[in-house]
Image (spheres, rainbow, N blue to C red):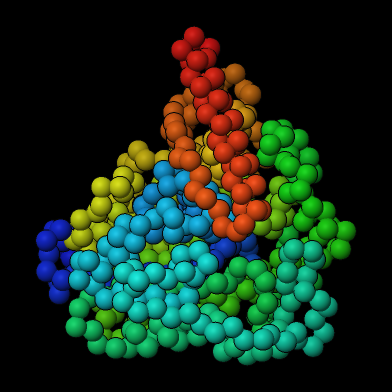
Amino acid sequence: MIIAGLVGFGSLLSPHAHAADRPNVLFIVLDDLNGWVGHLGGHPQARTPNIDRLAAAGLAFTSAYAPAPACNPARAAVMSGLRPFESGLYWNEQDWTRALGVETTLTARFISAGYGVFGAGKIFHDSIFRDGEWTEHFLPPERALAAAPGARDEGVGGIRFRPVANPPQDLPDYATVSWSIAKLQQRHDRPFFLAVGLTKPHMPWAVPQRYFDRFPLASIELPPHLDGDLDDVPAVARPPRAARDHERILRSGRWKEAVQAYLAATAFADEQVGRLLDALEASPHHDDTIVVLWGDNGFHLGEKGRWRKFTLWEEATRVPLVWVVPGVTRPGGVSPRAVDLSSLYPTLCELAGIERPEQVRTPSLVPLLRSPEAAWEHPALMTLEPGSSAVRFDRWRYIRYADGSEELYDRASDPNEWRNLAAQPTLAGTRASLAKRLPQAYATPVAVTGGRDGLWFLLGAILLLAAAALALRRMAQRRGRGG
């Protein structure tokens, strides 16, 4: 088991601490991993013993959220400290390299502080690596995967899943971890930052048959769902195209198969995390290395009649976040405070004694690492697109869309977010207080990649931004009139 070191990093290191005195960092990200891990209880059948042992060794956040419910903007926020409404990165189709200068990113910051910075797998979106951000990086080869005997097909519509006949060694994540283990086994002449990006449980949920066998199909439990759940949400939250995945799944009768496949892909990813943790424990770096593990965004598996992410509800935004910081966290720590992943950048800088750049204004999590239930006045913010954001604070989730429509959920009494309370007059004060926490301005969207389609996408984004600005102005006018 990972054991937190007895010797801390001083009172946390000063920004001028010598590089040799600084901790190493093992930075683990999993793609599309929602709250379906054992220690979070997101699904009763989830089996993630390795992620859970890491949580038992340090501090687990039970209310951690992605800054955006999509890979590109979420990862950009983590790696730059800029939330989407600050960077202009809202969608997967945008080119994040146009918004984030090399010198501003987290890995470049650690290089400038004297670290050796190594990356393997998917860290930024599209697995892009730029000079100046990495000392060395590795992208695993893609190998052909053959369907396991008896596999029906590749899934239902865009929801892709099937067991494969290949051994685990043929999957890219296995190679990513093997390369990273070699780095952990080396002796380094300076502190290192090792970023390990696993692509599972991102679709396709195609992993060896033995991971499927851990979850017998006949016993699979469906996630909580309610007929008519979306009857009280704004029209903008239920576009017809978003319901197509669920309609196809229902017609196919394969909902349980899809849930089984996601659980299997998560179990495979957890096993890779276990290989990393075992290697760290056996390495000469086990007692002076910070470990942080996170998921880049959540994922719907039929809750609220949705699949994938791209919503501002709990399922698409809640993620695992675990820290083990020698001398700072304590084994078995749990923090219920609502936080978002844009705080990883300033937290790691503070722990390593590196001065954060001026652009990073998100709060460091160090006070919560030390005292998990300390007072916390910083809400978790999530942005879907210009004008559409959610705030998670204390017991509440509040959503406001670009057209001004709203949702409000009391998660203490309604953890599945089945009852939209935004129209209740008795909660007007709560709604207004939470609304003040939302972004007051949205950065112009960064250009998207790809020819004519990209231009049409950008035009639509600009029109959406204009609509959001108009809605914000109208709200400000109503507040000014006391309405």
Given the current orientation, which residue lies at the most extreme top position?
481
How many numbered marks does the figure carry? 0
Picture coordinates of residue 131, whole percent (x, y): 35, 71
Residue 224, can we see it? no
Q: Is residue 292 left or right of residue 422?
A: left
Q: Looking at the image, which residue is at 73% across and 42% down?
A: 239
Residue 32, can we see it? yes
Q: Which residue is at the front of the view, 260 or 459?
A: 459
Tell me the quarter of the picture where residue 44 sits.
bottom right
Q: Is residue 233 above or below residue 106?
A: above
Q: Is residue 62 left or right of residue 308?
A: left
Q: Which residue is at the front of the view, 408 or 139?
A: 139
Q: Which residue is at the front of the view, 102 or 288?
A: 102
Q: Looking at the image, which residue is at 31% across and 45% down?
A: 361
Q: Is residue 119 left or right of residue 354?
A: right
Q: Is residue 27 left or right of residue 451?
A: left
Picture coordinates of residue 78, whole percent (x, y): 41, 57
Q: Looking at the image, which residue is at 73% across and 59% down?
A: 222
Q: Is residue 226 above or below residue 234?
A: below
Q: Which quadrant of the figure contains the N terminus?
A: bottom left
Picture coordinates of residue 37, whole percent (x, y): 55, 65
Q: Looking at the image, which residue is at 68% across and 36% down?
A: 236
Given the current orientation, which residue lies at the most extreme right position?
251
Q: Which residue is at the front of the view, 295 or 81?
A: 81
Q: Is residue 201 above or below residue 309?
A: below
Picture coordinates of residue 32, whole percent (x, y): 57, 63
Q: Is residue 163 above or below residue 250?
A: below
